[in-house]
C-alpha cells in the first residue's frame, strides 16, 4: 500500500491524457498542513513550463482528467497550481483493514529484489572500536534490516582493518609479551589502546624494534608461518572485543560477515598488474599511481590515487579496488553501500572512478559511499574522554544502561528488580542508537545523555513508552494482535492516524533510497505523537463508547503497536510490554 505511488500513477495517466509524456514528474508530496489536505500534487507547475501554458489553468485541466475514484473526497487547486488532495475516510479504512491482516503491515511485495552488499562497522583491529565505528555499525545495521524487510538480498560485509603496516609492530610486541609468559587476554590485550601505545613507544624509541617491525610486516604479508600465527592471535582477540560491542548493541553482524582487508590479499598482485597493463597506473617517484583528471584541483593538477607504495607495499586503496571486483563481479551486486565517516569521501570517489575505468565495477552496480558526520561532545568538540582519550564503545554502552536504570527506576512502579534491569538495558542502548540514527546522517551531532534519555521529544524512551501505553490499553481490553474487527474512521484524529499508518512503505522506500534511517525515526516519532493525540480525543475503553467504535479504535491501536514494534526493530531497538 503506497498512497504516494498510487497518486503518482493516477496523475501520470492524467498527464498522458493531456498530451504530456508518461514520465512527467507528478511531484506528489505529503501535505504540510491540514488545510492543504492529505497529499499534494505539485507537478502541474513544471509541466506548464514544458507546455508554456498557465500553471493554474493546467492544474485545472489535470483535476478534470484525474480519476481518483473513491480514494479522495476532493482535489482543490491552490496558489499557482498546487493540487491538494483530501483522502476519503471509508477508502482509507478499507486500505487499513487490508493492511491489518497482512504480516508486512501493508508493505507491498518487492517486485524487483536487488542484491545489495553493505559494508559497515569495519573497525580497525589494531585498536579499540571508537565512536566513529558506533555510527558506521548502527546506521549500517538499520539500513540492512530495512533492505531485508523490503525484500532485497543483503550481503553484509564487515571490512575489518586487519592488514596495515601497524601489524608488524603489534606482533613484534606481542611476541615479546608471550615470551615473557604474560597472559594474552587477561593482561596483554585486555586493553588494545594501551597495547598499541606500548608498541608504538618501542617502535619510536627502542633500537632495532622498528626494523624488526618492518621485517615482520613483510614476512606476514608473504605468508610466514610464525608471523601469521602471532597475527592470528592478535586478530582473534581483537575480534572478541568487537563481538562484545556488537552483542551489547543488538546488531545483526556475525563472524560469517567478516570479510576483512586481508581477505583480498591474494588478489592484489593481479590488480596491480592489470592496472599497469591497462596503462591506468603509472610509476611516479617509485610508487604506482593512477592520476585522476576528473578530480583535478583548481590549478588543474590531477588527483593522485596511490595503489602501490615505493618498495611494493599495498594500501587501503588497493584492497578497496579488489573489493569492488569481488562485490560487483563475484557477488553480482546491484548496489554496494559503504558507511564510513565523511573524511573518507575523496578516497571512495577515487576508488569508484578507477574501478569503473578498470572494469572492476560493472556499470550495473551502483556504488554508494554513504558518509556520516562526527559525534561531538557537549563542548562542541569531537567526542573524547575527559582526559582527551578515545571513548571505548563497550564502556559508553555500559554507562548508557546505568544512566537508563536511574531514569527507569524513577518512573517504574510495579516492576521487579530483574524487569528493571532488562528495561534499563533496552532503554539505554535504544537511547544511544535512536539519538544517533535520528540525526541527518551527514551532519555532526552533539552527544547528550540528558537529551537522549528524556521521555519528551524524539527519543527512544519516548517511543518505547508510547509502545507500552498502547500495549497496556490492549491488555486492559483483553485483545491480542490477532484480534479482528471492522475499521471505521470518523473523527479527524482517527483519520490522521490512519494516513500515517498507511505511510510505512513510502517511508521505507525513502530510507532505502539514500540510506537515511533518520527518516524512519521521524516517521515513528510522528506516529507515536499522532497516536497520543488520537488517544486523548477518542476514548476507547470508557463507559458509553459504542462497541463498534471501541473495536475500530482497538484495531487502530493494534496496528499502531505492531508498526511501532516493527519500525523500532528495523532500527535495531527493542521494545517492552511495561516500563
Ligand atoms: N576500517 C575503515 C575505518 O575504520 C573503514 C572501512 C570501510 N570500508 C572499506 N571498504 N574501505 O575507517
Image (spheres, rainbow, N blue to C red):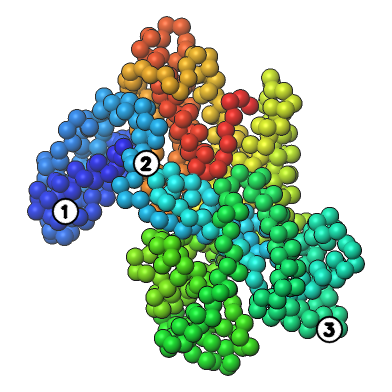
Which residue of the protein is positioned furthest toward the right in this rendering? 180
Q: Nearer the viewer, residue 281 or 85?
A: 281
From the Cβ of disc 1, is ligand 1 less than 8 Å away? no
Q: Quadrant of the C terminus?
A: top right
Q: What's the CA distance linking mark 3 and mark 2?
A: 62 Å
Quadrant for residue 472, please give it: top right
Residue 488: x and y in percent read: 32, 20
Identify the residue shown where x is 13% and y is 60%.
Answer: 52
Q: Which residue is disc 1 drawn over?
A: 22
Q: Residues within 10 Å of mark 3 (few under 14, many from 20)?
A: few
Residue occupying the point 43% across, 62% down: 331
Disc 1 + disc 3, Cβ < 8 Å: no
Q: CA distance from mark 1 to mark 2?
A: 23 Å
Q: Earlier in the sequence, mark 1 or mark 2?
A: 1
Position of 213 with respect to 302 (left or right) is right
The residue identified by callout 3 is 208
Residue 481 falls left or right of residue 398: left
Residue at 43% in and 49% down: 147
Nearer-the-camera pick, 282 or 25: 282
501 vs 191, left or right, is left
Image-quarter location of ligand 1: bottom right
Percent x, y for residue 9? 21, 45
Q: Is residue 287 visible?
A: yes
Q: CA distance from mark 1 to mark 3?
A: 73 Å
Task: For marks 1 and 3, give the one nearer the viewer.
Answer: 3
Name which of mark 3 and mark 2 comes first in the sequence. Answer: 3
Mark 3 sits near ligand 1, with its Cβ under 8 Å away: no
Amino acid at each position: 500500500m503506497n498512497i504516494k505511488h498510487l497518486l503518482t500513477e493516477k496523475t501520470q495517466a492524467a498527464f498522458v491524457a493531456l498530451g504530456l509524456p508518461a514520465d512527467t514528474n507528478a511531484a506528489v508530496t505529503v501535505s504540510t498542513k491540514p488545510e492543504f489536505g492529505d497529499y499534494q500534487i505539485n507537478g502541474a507547475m513544471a509541466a506548464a513550463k514544458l507546455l508554456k501554458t498557465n500553471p493554474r489553468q493546467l492544474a485545472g485541466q489535470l483535476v478534470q482528467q484525474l480519476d481518483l475514484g473513491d480514494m479522495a473526497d476532493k482535489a482543490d487547486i491552490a496558489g499557482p497550481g498546487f493540487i491538494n488532495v483530501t483522502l476519503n475516510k471509508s477508502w482509507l479504512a478499507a486500505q487499513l483493514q487490508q493492511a491489518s491482516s497482512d504480516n508486512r503491515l501493508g508493505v507491498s511485495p518487492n517486485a524487483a529484489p536487488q542484491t545489495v552488499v553493505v559494508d559497515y562497522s569495519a573497525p580497525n583491529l589494531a585498536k579499540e572500536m571508537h565512536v566513529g565505528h558506533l555510527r558506521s555499525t548502527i546506521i549500517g545495521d538499520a539500513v540492512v534490516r530495512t533492505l531485508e524487510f523490503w525484500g532485497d538480498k543483503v550481503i553484509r560485509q564487515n571490512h575489518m582493518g586487519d592488514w596495515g603496516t601497524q601489524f608488524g609492530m603489534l606482533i613484534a610486541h606481542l611476541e615479546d609479551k608471550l615470551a615473557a609468559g604474560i597472559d594474552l587476554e587477561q593482561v596483554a590485550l585486555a586493553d588494545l589502546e594501551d597495547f598499541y601505545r606500548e608498541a608504538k613507544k618501542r617502535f619510536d624509541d627502542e633500537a632495532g624494534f622498528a626494523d624488526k617491525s618492518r621485517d615482520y610486516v613483510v614476512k606476514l604479508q608473504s605468508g610466514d608461518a610464525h608471523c601469521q600465527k602471532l597475527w592470528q592471535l592478535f586478530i582473534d582477540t581483537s575480534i572478541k572485543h568487537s563481538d562484545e560491542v556488537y552483542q551489547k548493541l543488538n546488531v545483526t553482524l556475525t563472524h560469517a560477515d567478516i570479510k576483512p582487508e586481508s581477505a583480498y590479499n591474494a588478489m592484489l598482485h593481479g590488480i596491480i598488474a592489470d592496472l599497469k597493463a591497462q596503462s591506468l597506473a603509472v610509476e611516479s617517484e617509485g610508487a604506482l599511481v593512477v592520476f585522476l583528471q576528473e578530480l583535478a584541483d583548481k590549478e588543474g593538477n590531477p588527483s593522485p590515487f596511490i595503489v602501490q607504495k615505493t618498495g611494493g607495499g599495498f594500501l587501503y586503496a588497493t584492497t578497496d579496488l579488489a573489493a569492488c571486483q569481488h562485490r560487483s563481479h563475484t557477488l553480482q551486486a546491484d548496489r554496494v553501500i559503504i558507511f564510513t565517516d565523511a573524511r573518507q569521501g575523496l578516497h571512495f570517489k577515487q576508488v569508484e572512478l578507477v574501478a569503473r575505468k578498470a572494469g572492476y565495477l560493472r556499470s550495473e552496480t551502483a556504488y554508494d559511499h554513504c558518509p556520516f558526520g562526527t559525534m561531538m561532545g557537549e563542548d562542541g568538540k569531537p567526542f573524547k574522554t575527559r582526559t582527551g582519550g578515545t571513548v571505548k564503545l563497550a564502556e559508553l554502552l555500559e554507562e548508557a544502561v546505568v544512566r537508563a536504570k536511574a531514569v527507569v527506576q524513577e518512573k517504574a512502579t510495579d516492576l521487579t528488580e530483574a524487569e528493571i534491569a532488562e528495561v534499563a538495558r533496552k532503554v539505554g542502548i535504544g537511547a544511544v542508537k535512536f539519538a544517533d540514527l535520528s540525526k541527518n546522517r551527514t551532519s555532526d551531532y552533539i552527544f547528550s545523555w540528558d537529551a537522549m534519555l528524556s521521555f519528551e521529544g524524539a527519543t527512544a524512551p519516548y517511543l518505547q513508552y508510547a509502545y507500552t501505553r498502547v500495549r497496556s490499553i490492549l491488555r486492559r481490553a483483553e485483545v491480542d494482535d490477532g484480534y479482528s474487527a471492522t475499521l471505521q474512521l470518523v473523527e479527524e484524529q482517527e483519520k490522521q492516524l490512519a494516513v500515517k499508518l498507511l505511510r510505512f512503505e513510502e517511508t521505507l522506500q525513502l530510507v532505502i533510497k539514500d540510506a537515511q534511517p533518520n527518516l524512519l525515526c521521524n516517521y515513528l516519532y510522528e506516529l507515536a505523537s499522532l497516536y497520543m493525540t488520537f488517544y486523548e480525543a477518542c476514548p476507547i475503553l470508557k463507559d458509553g463508547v459504542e462497541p463498534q467504535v471501541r473495536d475500530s479504535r482497538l484495531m487502530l491501536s493494534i496496528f499502531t503497536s505492531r508498526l511501532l514494534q516493527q519500525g523500532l526493530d528495523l532500527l535495531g531497538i527493542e521494545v517492552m510490554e511495561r516500563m
